Each structure stands twice: as structure tokens, then as C-alpha cells.
Amino acid sequence: MGSRNRDIQWSAMVRRREDGAEHRPSGTPPPKPRRRPTIQDLARAAATSPSTASRALSGNGYVAADVRVRVLEAAERIGYVPDINARTLRNRTSRAVGVLISDLRNPFYATLAAGIEQRLRSAGYHVIVVNNDGEEEAEVEGARTFLAVRVSAAIVTPVSERAVRMLMDDGVPVVQADRMVDGLTSDGVLVDNVQGARRITEHLIGLGHTRIALLIDETDWTTGAGRLDGYRAALRAAGLPMDPALVVPTRFQPEAAREAVTALLARRPDVTELFAATNMLAEGAFQALQRGGRRVPEEISLVAFDDVPWMSMVSPGVTTVDQHTDDLGRTCAQLVVDRIAGSSAGHTTVKYIEPSIIIRGSTGPPRGSTVPAARPEPGPLTTSPPS
Amino acid sequence: MGSRNRDIQWSAMVRRREDGAEHRPSGTPPPKPRRRPTIQDLARAAATSPSTASRALSGNGYVAADVRVRVLEAAERIGYVPDINARTLRNRTSRAVGVLISDLRNPFYATLAAGIEQRLRSAGYHVIVVNNDGEEEAEVEGARTFLAVRVSAAIVTPVSERAVRMLMDDGVPVVQADRMVDGLTSDGVLVDNVQGARRITEHLIGLGHTRIALLIDETDWTTGAGRLDGYRAALRAAGLPMDPALVVPTRFQPEAAREAVTALLARRPDVTELFAATNMLAEGAFQALQRGGRRVPEEISLVAFDDVPWMSMVSPGVTTVDQHTDDLGRTCAQLVVDRIAGSSAGHTTVKYIEPSIIIRGSTGPPRGSTVPAARPEPGPLTTSPPS
DNA sequence: ATTTAATGTGGCATCGTTACCACAGTGCGG
DNA sequence: CCGCACTGTGGTAACGATGCCACATTAAAT
């Protein structure tokens, strides 16, 4: 399959083709693309008409058994591959779905995309991926691309209202993933942020923490707002004081979070617990604690929302809310499939993914607590049923 | 933008639309897609002909200035978006590029895809992503999809020979990424695996290690073969014995690597250094060391090939070979752009990405060494120039 | 004044596929 | 024996965009 001979691979930075192809001056257009066999060629090869060949391939309408076989064999023989563009043009509907996400480099979005692609592919769709890097312009540009290729649906982790609205205005079914634009009625799959945040906060309270800082980058979306609400609800329910200074705003980058945490710890040495609202913020928080030489969880505990790989690699592992991102992606894809099939016509569906809590070593009783530390390390374990 | 009001978001698991749309029984096809304006509609709206409208939009051929303005305004007004399928059909060339990769959930591939998408998007292409999960069947299926949509090029991290060959046989320009199928002459972007492995092995030898185990999952591809060769070359150059029992084969999953490492350490307690050939293997190796209670790097050192996020989060951080994956992806995309533009016609290009070494805390002198440990922790630092 | 060039415009065929329709056989019941 | 349902086939017209070509108008050159 591959080469075992490194010398061959290694011999040159640039290999030149040795075939007889004339050297064409650079700048000239590439050689005319080889003409691909059309259904006309196929019909000829199978000694029938294009209409019949089409019916034989698609299974719509009458075709004699032997003719069908002839057509299929001929298709195989001449390497016929139908032109999706022509088909889409004619049928006015495609098997393409647009996926518009914020940042493939973030494992959350990568996993989401993987889940979406997996299910859509097995349902016979292909996926056009546009990354928007969190920028509205790129998002709108992506939406325009989706309209241009006539995708039959789009899955979007929205950054702004415009893109989703554009798509919906044009009649493209949209599934919003992870968060939804307020006021736009589309299908969606959300995580139960309130419940996840509340449950993990309760876990902390149960350990004896009373001064829990929440590190958060936005509260404009249901994600941030829900996590804040869950945090507050847990405090309220436990009758704990709600100290506004413990809700620490930050930008979304790890570096920003790191600085925010460092500043917080200097300002409020009484904090015994950090709750990072996203995996990026958790990254910064973790680094701040590490560089500050804080022992976790003896001096200070840490929890996160959104489980990503590094959290189970570090020690102590980070206690976190598992969003079941893969499932989130697959569910989005399923809604798309249902919507296209028409089985969800007449109403929109918003599904909630029930997150679970993964308790690792980063949480323990607050320092000075009389309760002996019962650390479940090693080996992450889940305390809630799968969603 | 988003909702601050969790109660609204929260009120129901499934919201039903309140508009007057009649409830259609499920199973029936969705309502007819709203007819999108065509270039005919645009021409009418701009009081001109389709030909002129086309010229006005594309900039090919003569159009009076005022007419151009009228057309552009009309396009904006009626929301005209050209149909890519019709255009592709007519032009026999598209702005779509297929990307066929192994595993979006692996940060290596996710980053690669992100780099590819980024550059292609800025060059005006859109990307069709197919994940093959390392399976040949899925890969071939993906290639078939690319042929069907008439992509103008494809970027592939090959799993088998078939898919790449299929594409090339059909005249689709292919850029092979990370590894290349032996005997197929296409553009490609590879990492200088030999050099990377050699340099990091030399680093270990410089620290005093002599019994360095290489954990590796395959040597059939240039990736594995190159890393093995680099490892051997460094040993040879240093005059160290080449113990075949220290080249440890394993399957590619972290779990397999974990078991392989555990078994190795039991069998060969004299090993002072582990070199994991991929990020997945490093994950397993790291876990094995952690669970086995080995102190790193005092008892045993660890290095990896391919830097992924968790390696800089754990402590000690993992010394590793940085493949500049993002750059790898962007370079692939650039080759595609050049190939389509015809500027690389007449020869194929294979580019090598020069990796660099990131020294973190997981490497130190072997136990029993008289040289005092000079640990550069904390703070990763790069010892080589960027590629 | 007449040719020639430059600027502009619209008609038309085409890309490859499919659905609709007309039509041709066959078998069967009345 | 005729009509009718059923099976099966191929012709044809679209889907929407575009580039070629013919043609029209004006400006410039002889």
C-alpha cells in the first residue's frame, strides 16, 4: 500500500512526473477535463435509451429485469457516475446539507461536526462544511454558499441572526445547534445548560463549597445564560449568598480566562471553587491554577462545562459537564433527515440533550473543611444516566 | 441576539409553531420549495435580457455601466443567488473541493481540515467533507461522491489505494495529505517524519538514554516507516545498539497502546524512555505510566510524535514533534489552488513540512544518571525554526 | 461618404438528468 | 373479436446559467 522505502519518498522535495506529458508553460489553464460518460453513453453501451437507463438506475417506473441488469452492468463497465449537478438542477432538490460552525479546531465543534457528518452520510447525504471563526461576515457568506448550491437543509451553530434568517427566508430548513437565535422559529438541538450547571454546582455545594466563582464569557446566548441561571438556581436552592463579584466575565480565549482567574485569586483569596463555563475557559483556568502553584483540589477546586480530551488526561482530572456532543451532532442530523422527509412537517422540534456530570479529581471539599476528602481518583465515573 | 430569558427557551421540550400553517399529516412530502428567482427573473427586474444580466454579474463581455448597476441593484432587491448546479453543469467545472479524511474526532485531522477549509474558503472554494473512519469502503464511497458532484479537486489522507486511484483515473486532481499511496503520482504534502523522529530521538540520546522503546502502530505508510527510520538513524548515528524488542507494535487505539506499554514495562524494566509514534499512542502510553504510578521523567521519559492540546495541559507536559498541522492543511489547499489555476501544470509537487521539536517536562536524564536533571519546565519552548 | 473598429445587446443552443407522455406489445375478460 | 389493463420503451421538454454568434449602434479613420 504505502511505501516502505524511505529513500524513494525522501529523494526530493519536489518530484517531477516522468510520463511523456509535454511540459506546459505555467499560467496556462489545465488540460481539458476528460469527458465523463453521460447517461447517453450508458444508454448506448446498454443498447437502450437514456430514459430507460435512468429508470433502471433509479428504480422509478417499469424496466424489464434483463434490461435493468444490462444497464447496471454497463454502468459498472464504463464507470458511469451520475452528475449530481444535473440531477439537482432537474429535480430541484439535492442531497447536500450545509454545516456552518464556529471553530473546527475546538474539539467541541469538531466532535459536533463528526457526529453530524456520520449520520448524514449514512442517510445518503453529503456535507458542505463552512467554518466561520465566530465572524458574522463569514457566516453570512457561508449561508449564501448554501443557498447557491441549493442545499436541502442547513445545520448552524449561530453567531448572528443574519445567516439563519437568510436561510429561513429562502425556505431552507434550518437546524440550530447548541444555541438558538432568539425569535427565529426553527428546529434546534440544545443542551440543557441550566440543568447541567445546576447539577454540577449542587455537587460542589454538597462538598461544602460556599464561595464558588463562575468564569463566563457571555450571557447573551442560551448557552451562557442557561449556565449562569443553573449556577444561580443551585445557590439559591441551597440558601447560599449570591455574590455578584464571583461571577467573573471574561473574553472567550484561554489566555483571557487565565488572566481573569489570576486576577480573581489575587482579589478574592477566599474563593474555594472555580466553575469555568466553557472548555476554553477551563483551559485558561487550569493553566492559571497550575502556574500559580495552587494545589487542586486541596487549595481550590475546579469544574468545567463541556468535557474535552485534555480534561481526562491531566491529573487531577477535571470534573465536568459532559454535553454528549457526538449525540448532539447526530440528533441535529436526525432532525434534518426528518425534516426533509416531511415527517416533521407542520411543527418545529427543539430537542434537549440531557448532560451528565463526570466527577474526576479536581473537586474536593474546600480547604479547612472537616469532612475528609473522599477523592474518587483515579478512573472517571459518571453519576448520571446517559441521555 | 440570543435569549436571556431562560423560561422561554425552557418552557417546552418541543415547541409547536403558532403560525397559521395547516397541519399536514406526517409522511407527506414537504411543501413545494419556494421558487427562487432565476436569472430570467433578474433580467425582467432589470429590464434587460438574461445574457446581459449574466455578463453584468460575471464581468465577462461588454455591459453598459448603467445597465450593470441596474442589474446589480435588481439582484440585491429580489435576492438573486445564482444556481451553482446549473453553472457547474454548463461550465463543466465547479468551485467545490472534496476533503476525505480519516477521523474528525482526532485533533490532528480536525486541525488539518480546519487549515484546508480556511484557505480554500478564502480562495473562493467550498469544501465537501467526508469522514471515512479509516475504512476503505467509506473512502471509496466518498470518492464516488466527489466524482458525482464534479469537484474540481480532492484532498485525501489515504486509507487505501482505491479511492485515490479512482479520482485520478477520472482526471480529478488529488492532493494527498500526511501520507501518500506508493506508486501513485499526485501532488502531496508530507511531514518530514524521518527528520522529526531523528531529531527527537537525538534529544533523548543527548540526555543519556540508551534503551528507548518505540511504540508504533504501522510501518506500511511513509508516516510510520519514516518515524521508524528516523528513530533507527539516530540510534545508528550515536552508535547505540538496535534492540528489535524495543520496537513495540500495537494497534492504533489508545487502549491498545496502554496495554502494550504496561506489558512492555513488565517485560523490560530496563527501558528508560518511551517514544509514541502518534498522538493516540501517546495518550495510551501516558495513561499506562500514570496508572502504573511511574514518575515522569524521573523514572521514565516520554515523547510523542504529533502535538495535540492535552500534551501541553498535563504535567509534566509531553515533549513532542510538532507537525505544524494547520500549516500542513493550508499547504494542501494551496497546492489545490495552484493545480486548478494551472500554474503547476506539467509536473507534480510534493512538499515537505519541516516539523519542530517542543521540549516539555516529560523528558529528562535516565534514572541513575549522574547528570543533574535540567528540566526546562514550566513553559514549552521550541528549539527549531518554524517550517 | 464609406469602411472599420469598438461598444453593446439579445437569441439560442448547450451542459446531463429526469418526469411526463405517447405509444407498442401482451394477456385477459366480456 | 374487441376493449382494457398492464408492462415496457423511447422521445421530448424542461431545470438555470452561460458563451457564442449575429446584429445594432456609435465613433473613428480613411
Image (tube, coloured by chain):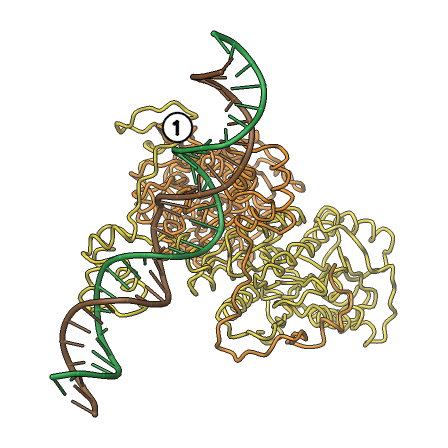
Chain colours: A orange, B yellow, C green, D brown
Identify whether A100 is placed above or below A240.
Answer: below
- In the image, taking residue D14 as reference, residue B162 lies left or right, namely right
x then y, percent, for residue B373: 72, 69
x then y, percent, for residue A12: 68, 77
Front one among A351 and B37: B37
Name the quadrant of the N terminus of chain B. top left
Residue depicted at x 64% and y 76%: A14
Q: Quadrant of residue A219?
A: top left
Front one among B295 and D22: D22
Say what amino acid the circle numbered 1 marks: Val
Q: Residues within 10 Å of mark 1 (few under 14, many from 20)?
A: some
* Circle 1 SS class: loop
Query: For mark 1, what is the residue?
Result: B14
- In the image, taking residue B363 as reference, residue B72 lies left or right, namely left
- In the image, taking residue B332 as reference, residue B82 lies left or right, namely left
x then y, percent, for residue B53: 26, 60
Chain identifier of the residue bearing label 1 in the image: B
Residue depicted at x 52% and y 46%: A302
Front one among A239 and A72: A72
Residue depicted at x 61% and y 72%: B348
Front one among B297 and D16: D16
The answer to whether residue A337 is seen in the rendering is: yes
x then y, percent, for residue B151: 51, 57
